[in-house]
Each structure stands twice: as C-alpha cells, then as structure tokens.
Image (cartoon, grey):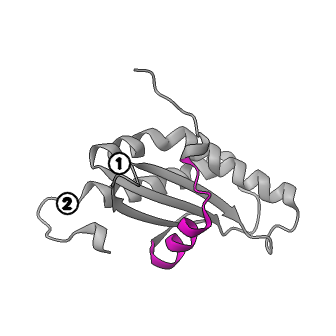
Amino acid sequence: MATKYGLPATGRLKHRKLIDALFTGGQKLSAGPYRVYFTVQPASPDRPAGVLFGTGVSKKKFARAVDRNLVKRRCREAYRLQQNSLHQLVRDNNRQVLLFFIYTGNSHLSFEDAYRAVGQALEKIGKKISGPRPGTAENPLNK
C-alpha cells in the first residue's frame, strides 16, 4: 500500500469542546519553539482510533495574520510529512490521540527547524503511546 501524506478535514482538531478539554485535562510537553498539548485515550465507538491535529500561534507575538498563517502552515506541513508512523502506532494500540501545537517563538521559524521540532514532539508522544519501557512498572498514560 502506498504511503498517504494527506491531512484531511477529518484529521483536524476543530471542535471547541475537544480543544477546551485538551487544554484543561491534557498533558503537555515542549519541543523546540512548540508547546504541545495532547491526550491519549482508548478508542471507543464514538471516538475511533486515530489522531486529531491542530495548531495555533499567538496574536500577541504575531500581530499580522499573514505571519501567523505562515507559521501555522509550516507546522501543518511538517506534521503532514511525519504523521504516518504516529498514525500506525495509534492504530496498533487502538488509541485516540488529540494533538495541539502552539508556537511559542518570537520570530519566524524556517521549515527545516519546524520539521525537526515537530519530529521531536511526535517521537516523544509515540513513546508515551507505545507503553512502558521494558524493566519499568510505570504507565506513561497516567502521567
């Protein structure tokens, strides 16, 4: 099967209730200039296994919409190119993941730097999804 790199509307985190729940009850991590909020939940009939992704940029730091859109576009593209391994891991573990990347930098980020930072974040989240490391008794989903 060919690798799909699309980011369809069904994979976007758009619902206000889900976003609010993510910010109030989700976990967060930092990866480069991004603060990433995420939740990992077991899949259910009303929430099938998969990943919902969103991104945002502060209006305070980037007053012009053109600049905010550029930063968000680079983040979405970096995610789109690296999402396949995370999606496979989520399907294999029958999980549902909500992701929201917030850009916290003060200046524009090159695509290469965005790609690297998004990759680091997805790697950290993948470790949380895949379970505890051999020899440890902790459950990463409870952190």
Q: In terms of sequence position, does the residue under pointer 1 or pointer 2 come before the other? A: 1
In the displayed orientation, state which residue is furthest to the left.
135
Kind of element beneath mark 1: helix
- Give the left or right position of residue 109, taking residue 54 as reference: right
What mark, if any, has residue 90 been given in the picture? 1
Residue that appears at 35% across and 48% down = 90
Residue that appears at 58% across and 50% down = 12
Question: Which class describes the residues within 10 Å of circle 1: few (<14), some (14-19), or many (20+)?
Answer: many
Asked if residue 113 is among those painted magenta in the image, a careful observer would answer no
Q: Position of residue 5 (x, y in %)?
A: 54, 33
How far apart are the two marked residues, 1 and 2, measured between alpha carbons?
17 Å
What mark, if any, has residue 133 been given in the picture? 2
Q: Amino acid at mark 1?
A: Val
Q: Amino acid at mark 2?
A: Arg
Q: Nearer the viewer, residue 129 or 122?
A: 129
Q: Is residue 93 above or below residue 60?
A: above
Question: Which class describes the residues within 10 Å of circle 2: few (<14), some (14-19), or many (20+)?
Answer: few
Q: Is residue 129 above or below residue 77?
A: below
Quarter of the figure with the N terminus: top left
Q: Quadrant of residue 88?
A: top left
- Give the left or right position of residue 35, taking residue 3 as reference: right
Q: Nearer the viewer, residue 108 or 53?
A: 53
Quarter of the figure with the C terminus: bottom left
Give the residues drawn in magenta, as a range.
11-26
Badge nearest the viewer, 1 or 2: 1
Predominant SS along the magenta part: helix
In the displayed orientation, state which residue is furthest to the top.
1
